Amino acid sequence: MKTPANEGFLKILRRLYSPEDAELILKMPWGQNGLQLVAAVTGLPPAVLRPRLEALADRGLLVDLRIEEEMKYAIPPMILGFFEYTMMRSGPDADSKALSGLYHEYLEKDDSFWAGNFGHGNRYSPMRTIPHESSVATPSPFRMPALDEVGHGAGS
């Protein structure tokens, strides 16, 4: 999925990330990385870095996964990532109405997003289907556990 920059995208980034958070994200390596690697790459001590990474993950702006007893951190992709995570947030500091307006502006004000993903022979789908378990007719041996069953975030 491509995320072409336009003024709408920059407004979203300014709304979601402080300048300090943006600087940290820009320095992070791509992929799932442990705290020690992120600390080495960013030059921040782990004791300073961990709460910043956890705060970004709590806001849906960073993915945190426990893999083999180690927390791994990853920058989420735009649409199937922080769009979903930030829009699923609730609470007093979650301004979904303003944020949804910014996402709408990004996707609809000009055609750079659609041209970047569907122009010149590209066919990157920005959407996905997640069926509700009760809508699947035949019981499946595979099951996607709900977040409240497996825990979520760095504190789980």
Image (cartoon, rainbow, N blue to C red):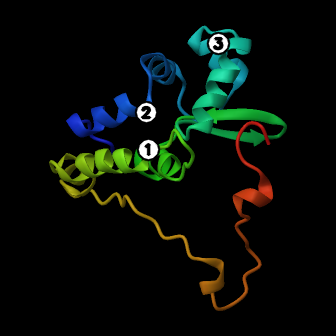
* Residue type highlighted by circle 1: Asp
- Does label 2 or label 3 sit earlier along the sequence? 2
Q: Which mark is residue 64?
A: none
Residue that appears at 77% across and 41% down = 67
Q: CA distance from mark 1 to mark 3?
A: 34 Å
Residue that appears at 49% across and 24% down = 25
- Does label 2 or label 1 sit earlier along the sequence? 2
Q: Is residue 104 visible?
A: yes
- Crowdedness of circle 2 by 10 Å Cα count: few (<14), some, many (20+)? some
Residue 79 image point, x, y percent: 41, 50
- Crowdedness of circle 3 by 10 Å Cα count: few (<14), some, many (20+)? few
Determine whether, in the image, residue 51 is placed left or right of residue 150: left
* Residue type highlighted by circle 3: Ala
Residue 32 image point, x, y percent: 63, 35
Residue 4 image point, x, y percent: 27, 40
* Residue type highlighted by circle 2: Leu
Determine whether, in the image, residue 16 is placed left or right of residue 38: left
* Position above or below: 77 against 132: above
Which type of secondary structure does the marked residue at label 1 adopt? loop
Foreground of the two, 14 or 6: 14
Q: CA distance from mark 2 to mark 1?
A: 11 Å
Residue 17 image point, x, y percent: 44, 27
Which type of secondary structure does the marked residue at label 3 adopt? helix
Residue on which the image places disc 2: 16
Looking at the rendered image, the disc whose residue lies closer to the viewer, 2 or 3, is: 2
Q: CA distance from mark 2 to mark 3?
A: 25 Å
Residue on which the image places disc 1: 95
- Does label 1 or label 3 sit earlier along the sequence? 3
Looking at the rendered image, the disc whose residue lies closer to the viewer, 2 or 1, is: 1
Q: Are marks 2 and 1 in contact (CB under 8 Å)?
A: no
Residue on which the image places disc 3: 40
Task: Tell me where residue 125 sits by quadrant.
Answer: bottom left
